[in-house]
Amino acid sequence: MNLLSAFGYGVIFGLGLTLMIGPVFFALIQTSIERGFRSGATMAVGIALSDAIYMVVASLGVAVLASSPIFQAWLGLVGGFILLAFGVANTRKKLKQPSNTVAASDSGNYIRQILKGFLLNGINPFVLLIWFGVGVAVMNYNLQQKILFFGGSLLTVLLTDFLKAFLANKLRRWLTPGFMNRMNKLVGVALIIFSIKLFYFAYEAFSF
């Protein structure tokens, strides 16, 4: 396989990842609509950072620990509590300002958005399993091919997340505070549902 093909396969895989609907998708859209493109984009950077860490670990072949049911169970349990906390917070949050403005304090909260994206994506055991599955699939690639494959995947995911944040931000001018409050509750419920899914995943792993 030539290097261009490895990069192309990475791009295709990255596009497939962007079609997956999970807690990160809902949180990214909500953040972009409520706080603007820059906050959404910085959250996307946090998502990409967690993916990058999993890519490095997967490319190094450190899959023994990650394939352990106990490790997956604890990751699912911790992830479930984090998603539950985010979900409950969203259901209780109320937007008081017009949706076409962004709070001045948001300019200093980009690190928080990066951490939010990093945590929401990084503590999801399903994301972990996907990347280690890919690590096994590309184990016969040489170093350059692995770098191009994972680089193509990461670049594609990051750029498409930027696009999602940009498009979601464009909707802000037509959204009322009442709609935003309903959306917060909807996103909160979605995160709570995903947390229950992670708790069940952890239960099955502990029972293994």
Image (spheres, rainbow, N blue to C red):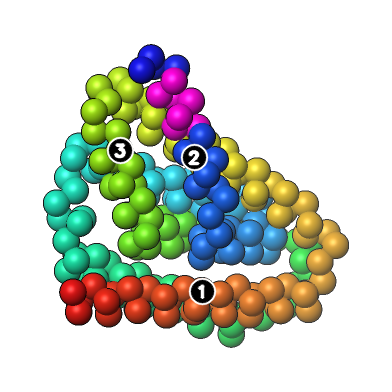
SS at mark 2? helix
Marks 3, 2: nearer the viewer: 3
Contact check, label 3 and label 2, Cβ < 8 Å: no
SS at mark 3? helix
> Where does the image place residue 64, in percent across and percent down from the top left?
14, 51
Residue shown at the point (85%, 62%) measured from the top left? 174
As drawn, the label of residue 137 is 3
Q: Residues within 10 Å of mark 1 (few under 14, many from 20)?
A: many
Give, as a single range, the part of the protein colored magenta: 5-11
As drawn, the label of residue 191 is 1
Q: What amino acid is at disc 1?
A: Leu
Contact check, label 2 and label 1, Cβ < 8 Å: no
Q: What amino acid is at disc 3?
A: Ala
As drawn, the label of residue 14 is 2
Residue 59 in magenta stretch: no
Q: What amino acid is at disc 2?
A: Gly
Does residue 190 appear to the left or right of 71 in the view shown?
right
**Relative to 55, is 4 above or below?**
above
